Amino acid sequence: MKQTRFSTGVAALQFAAACGTLMASISLGHAQAPQPGWVTVSACTPAGPLIPTNTNESCGSDILQPILAGLVTTDAKTGAIIEDVAASITTADNKTWTVKLQKGRKFHDGTEVLAKNFVDAWNWAAYGPNGQSNNDWFSVIVGYGDLNPKAPKGEKPPVPATNRMSGLKVIGDHEFQVELRMPVPVFRAQLSYKAFYPMPDSFFADPAAFGRKPIGAGPFQFVSGAPDSGYKLAAFPGYSGPAKPSIKGVDLRIYTSREAAYNDLVAGNLDLLRDIPASKLVADLWKRDLRGRAVIQPRANIQALGMPYTDANPQLLKPAIRQALSMAIDRKAIVDILFNGIGQPATGWVPPGTEGYQPGACGEYCSFNPEKAKSLLAQAGGYKGEIKLYYAGDSEVKSAMDAVCNSIQNTLSIACVTSALSDNATFRSFTRSGKADGPFPSNWTMDYPSIDNALIPLYSKDGTSNRGAYENAAFDALLDKAAKEETSAAIKTYQEAERMLTAEMPRVPLWNPAMTVGHSPKVRSVTLYANGRIDYSALLLKD
Amino acid sequence: MTGYILRRLLQFIPVFLGTTFVVFFLAWGMPGDPLAGKCGDRECPDAFVAAATEEFKLDRPLIVRYGYYLADLGRGDLGRSFTGRDVSEQLVAAFPATVRLALLAVLIEVLLGITIGVFAALRPGKTFDTATMMVGLGIIAFPSFVIANLAQLVFGVRLGWFPVTVSDPTSFAELLLPAIVLALAHQVTLSRLTRSAVIETMQSDYIRTARAKGLGEARIVVVHALRNSLIPAVTYVGKDIGGLLAGAVVVEGVFNISGVGGLIVQSIRSHDGITIVGAVTVVVVAYLFINLLVDLSYAVLDPRIRYD
């Protein structure tokens, strides 16, 4: 019996010792000594390999952005398009563009960025069988059709006879020429999109290896990382471009929820968090938690209500009813109350901060005017039945869509209900199928900050993302006219085209969200690009 | 015994096939085009759709694709997900964190649950018994995300005793707080199960015999009573390990552990059927093995139970 007592005591001691060891290792595990000059930033798991021409979602783009450099980039402060790897980009007719490169710009593997790196990369991405999601960016280049032969109905597309576009010509190591199928006045701005970035020779040998460990010509080079564990990017010592960073590196940590990242930020384990969770924006909670270390900046994004362009709901085809709906939405109240004043009501179809942005393009039709809304509805013969507003159940738009519905219902006395579809894939399939009989949220993030990017893909007859299948001959004619003009005249024509959208309201502009960033005391100043990404080269730390 | 284990292992095959079949059809039968929304705000270009359709055989009937899937599985290939990564690679990345968290949670659960259960059983209805029951009821009444968030806020953000999130899932120290959170709710049931089993055992004849022989109370409780009371507890713990291996989605989310739960939820959201089938299948197999181990442990705990 004594012996038993004794052994119980020993066991208890052992247990206590084990607990002590655990506690000791806690304090060890807790001390993640941050490397001096590095910043830790929240990121999310990329949805695919890190290949710029196959990356459209924001998680992968966030990681690629500091690694890559293209011909041109945007100045984070002014939003202007400035040369990056290019020395000059010139054209006489908007169709034939001559690109001269800077000498001595290097990829992270030490090889120089040459004209062939651009031409090969573009040919590879445009080659149909490679199935790149940014394939259609090259459709303006002469010879794109040869790389993407049309599939006979119900069959697989045939194998292309060539893998080079005839419109691309290497003239020298540092010069190449691009011939476009039609004039594109804003081609220089388009080149800031990552689909047009150069690829090192090693990419073509093994694209899959590149997708795990991308090599670019940008200010930061890939050190290590994986989709689940996060990425470490160090400042590239061989960088000689216009965006030399002052920090030593970026430690991108993968977070599955922004709430978790926010808690780490408040506890001092994280230096930068973009897109503060909505629950923390309530009553400016985040500004108190972070003691004012908060930045709000407009971003090149517009949220709108897409409209069905089929007979699924003939009433919603009437322009007057769409105008009435638009004027019945109290955008300012929704932004002020629901988003705590972060963001601004949209007054047109082009987000602010975009070359060619004009305030008030939508005119009175995007301002809250219950009287006018009612009279427009009466003129159109009223609305019978209810309006169903569809949204993806796994997105964060529910409360905003409820607010839009309430606003419409209160102003026009039309029954409005929101209807959640299970997830984004279901939502996207449904809204483009033509079966949607009600409006649906439609978000557009600018690929490059120029007005045409907010108009052509969405509202032109062959627009790549024209989900409502909107068609307006006069609008298309203006786009054609702009294509033949020099850039500043073209932008005026695009603005005229934008104002034309008020007549039929193919989409009802709602608001332009802003980007919220919280940072640690270590950070002195944060600058964001128009697309809401952090400009790590302009990031300053306290010393 | 060997024959019994072999029979049980053979039974895994139909269960395994049935699971993959059902999950495969559920995962790919979800409404909506799996390629929709794969290109951000833009619509996907034809070349992308054609290449993805070809790679994932999206244009074939489901039953044909299931055949291909089984054939690949036979070669040990779990397939490649929409993310361009091999499913096996994703599982290898996700499972270790979940397994560690599950084992640590179960360890804490067993330590707490059995200890509380035994002490409560020794003086049923007295202060300790009533107090632990009241506290336990309180814990169960809170949903796990409340406890998880609260623990994170208080012990992580405010007091700084624990890391706020798990940045390195190989560190047991970092997993301790999430494991305690998981264990708290589970230990309540375990301690109640242990308590009632021990109370029942303590009234049986052989305990009276042991007392009559003059054995000490500690030896009677720990060696004689507890061992015979463990069968319901072991069954419950086995069920718990199985459940935790499928991923504690909520707790993993709060503490930012990239484990199995998050992987499955993420793949369901992105209609990544191949990953869903792979992950769920591995979870099911793990569950089957744990059940087998639980059944075998009965024979160890109670020599009257024999398998042949």
Image (tube, rainbow, N blue to C red):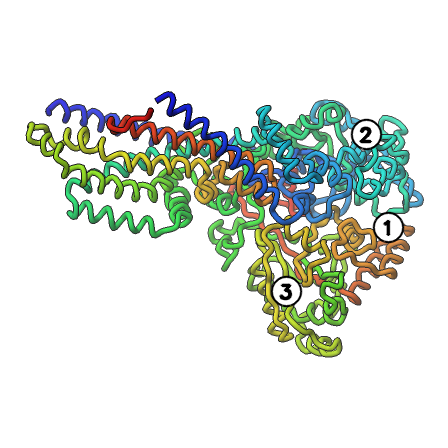
Q: Nearer the viewer, residue A320 or A346?
A: A320
- Disc 3 from disc 1: Cα separation: 42 Å
Q: Residues within 10 Å of mark 1 (few under 14, many from 20)?
A: some
Q: Which residue is mark 1?
A: A487
- Residue B20: x and y in percent read 54, 36
Q: Which residue is mark 2?
A: A120
Numbered disc total = 3
- Residue A300: x and y in percent read 69, 51
Residue A397 horizontal side relative to residue A381, left or right: left
The reply to whether dot 1 and dot 2 touch (C-beta < 8 Å) is no
Chain label for disc 2: A
| Residue in the image at 77% along x and 42% along y | B46
- Residue A316: x and y in percent read 72, 67
Name the element at disc 2: helix
In what quadrant of the picture does the C terminus of chain B appear? top left
Q: Amino acid at mark 3?
A: Lys
Q: Amino acid at mark 1?
A: Thr
Chain label for disc 3: A
Name the element at disc 1: helix
